[in-house]
Amino acid sequence: MLKPGDVVLTKVQFTDTFEIKVRPAVVLFEEFNNIIVAGVTSNCNMKGIPLTKKEGAVKDSVIKLNYLFTVSRAMISKVLFSLTTKKKNIIFEQLLKRLKVLNE
């Protein structure tokens, strides 16, 4: 069973091409076998939430909250590690800040 904050390896279709690649992503929530994830990149120059090797990442990386997508369970090959409660709270706060514009 996947949990919010699990970092998984999943198939991702890129927005600028039809190419599908296997990439890490953070599980945000799951509903009816649709899993909403945030992409992770090792390009530390990109804007996002830092994710370090010390936390479990293969390379220092960034969680990209501007890159959310839905995957099915079949697209996820494995769980790599789980984020700390502190890191999950940072994700929550950043997502909430971005979604507040819907309430304005």
Image (cartoon, rainbow, N blue to C red):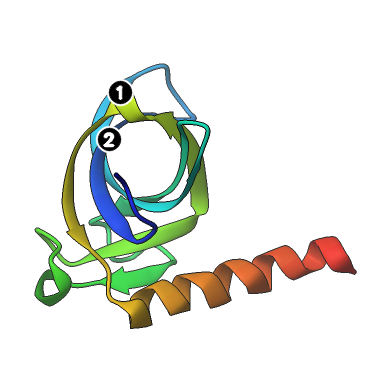
Estimate how packed mark 2 is, as few (under 14), some (14 to 19) or many (20 or more) residues with alpha carbons within 10 Å.
Answer: many
Say if 102 sits above or below 32 in the image.
Answer: below
The residue located at (32%, 63%) in the rendering is 62
Q: Quadrant of residue 77?
A: top left
Disc 1 to disc 2, how far (Cα)? 9 Å
**Label 1: which residue?**
74
Say if 74 sits above or below 101 in the image.
Answer: above
| Amino acid at circle 2 | Thr
| Amino acid at circle 1 | Ala
User: Residue 89: which disc?
Assistant: none
Tell me the mark number nearer the camera, choosing from 1 and 2. Answer: 1
Q: Earlier in the sequence, mark 1 or mark 2?
A: 2
Left/right placement of residue 19 relative to residue 28 reads: left
The residue located at (58%, 66%) in the rendering is 95
**Mark 2 and mark 1 in contact (Cβ < 8 Å)?**
no
**Label 2: which residue?**
10
The residue located at (27%, 35%) in the rendering is 10
Left/right placement of residue 42 relative to residue 27 reads: left
Estimate how packed mark 1 is, as few (under 14), some (14 to 19) or many (20 or more) residues with alpha carbons within 10 Å.
Answer: few
Left/right placement of residue 33 relative to residue 1 reads: right
- Residue 9 placed where, x, y %? 22, 40
Say if 35 sits above or below 52 in the image.
Answer: above
- Residue 31 placed where, x, y %? 53, 39
Which element carries disc 1, helix, strand or loop? helix
The residue located at (82%, 61%) in the rendering is 102
Quarter of the figure with the C terminus: bottom right
Which element carries disc 2, helix, strand or loop? strand
